[in-house]
Image: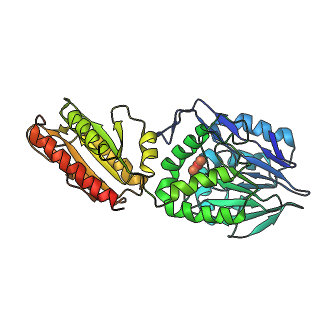
Amino acid sequence: MKEIAPGVFYCGLHDRNRKLFDQLVPLPQGTTYNSYLVEGAEKRALIDTMYEKLLGPYCDMIAARGAKIDYIVSNHAEPDHSGAIPTLLKTYPEAVVLCSPKCAENLVNMLGVDPSRIRAVADGEEVSLGGRTLKFIMAPWVHWPDTMFTHLVEDNFLFSCDYFGAHYTDNELFADCSENLAEAAKRYYSEIMMPFRGFCAKYLGLARAMNPKMILPSHGPVYDRPEFIMNLYAEWVSDKFARKVVMPYVSMYDNTRIMVDYLENALRSRGITVVRAELIGADEGEIAMQLIDAPCVVFGTSMVLTGPHPKSVYAAYLINILRPKLKYFGVIGSYGWGGSLSAPIEACFKLARPEKIPGVEVKGRPVGETFRALDDFAARIDEKISAL
Ligand code: FEO
């Protein structure tokens, strides 16, 4: 347990060996599950708890600090933060869980928490610890509907739950504000928060208005210089686009790859940055990060039977659920005898609604006509993104 300020302690744990989050998101350096202990003159509160798999060391750490916990604040019910609650409630029979009404429902449904041990709080409600006040701020959809923030009023510390988090284990406690941290926070934003960009922008405004002395998220370091992470979020939630095209591609016999190469050069010659992502063995997080400011995605895909390669459909599905601020998409590729490369990809876009720029599909090898069509396609993309 590390002291952040007098009576405020970090009791999170590092999980450096974890490779995936949600069995989907790669974790290049693992993650941390952050929990905080706040002590007032009369009461003691935990703010968020621990993933169940680290229950033993976590409970030992809490017990070593004293025998009494009055409140367990659950800012969000996802088990990486709430997994220890059932055990804590047994260990501390006087403890009451404070959370949003939606979180109360989730704790009962997901973890079997006894409803009589939960007290749902309202937006703006305050609880005194004796000389210290916890104020609860409902903040749904960053990234679950149950999320709330907790403000430690006198210290002006903002416990922001997953919002402002990062899967980053290099720091022991306070943010190093390095390029590596910025990259990890960007990856986290793109994977977890980007689908809720409007809410992120709203809560960024709220956080700025509070001018917190520290931001204490549920993953990654504590920001004792909060402007670092708030400035990054301001960039990511903005409506601005880079002059960039992201190209996820998969090529079975090089024909599609030749088309991707050609289009890349054609776009680059127009001053457009091209980010290629070979889909075999791709890191979804890298693609997600590139989507934060990309106005256009072009899928390069071979045909498998009568449709696009399943890897490209997976990429389209993933992009759809990540809901970037994407404006345009297109499809290029080669096929053997027939079918449609673009229709199944287009069908994936149910949430994100990018406009289709008709691409280039060629039977067999790309030839002179194909390359002229790719030049025209590059010109159409240039025209569209230049108008943004
Ligand atoms: Fe880190 Fe949504 O839990």
Look at 21% across and 44% down and name the residue there.
332
- Is 278 situated left or right of 5 in this image? left
Residue 211 placement (x, y as % from top left): 72, 61
The colour scheme is: rainbow
Q: Nearer the viewer, residue 52 or 214?
A: 214
Look at 69% across and 37% down and name the residue there.
13
Q: How many callouts does the rendering have?
A: 0
Q: Nearer the viewer, residue 95 or 209?
A: 209
Quadrant assignment, res 365: top left
Residue 240 placement (x, y as % from top left): 46, 58
| Residue 279 to residue 40: above or below | above
- Is 85 situated left or right of 373 in this image? right
Residue 172 placement (x, y as % from top left): 72, 35
Look at 15% across and 47% down and name the residue there.
373
- Is 226 situated left or right of 41 in this image? left
| Residue 165 to residue 302: above or below | below
| Residue 320 to residue 333: above or below | below
Look at 83% across and 61% down and name the residue there.
154
Quadrant assignment, res 53: top right
Q: Nearer the viewer, residue 72 or 228?
A: 228
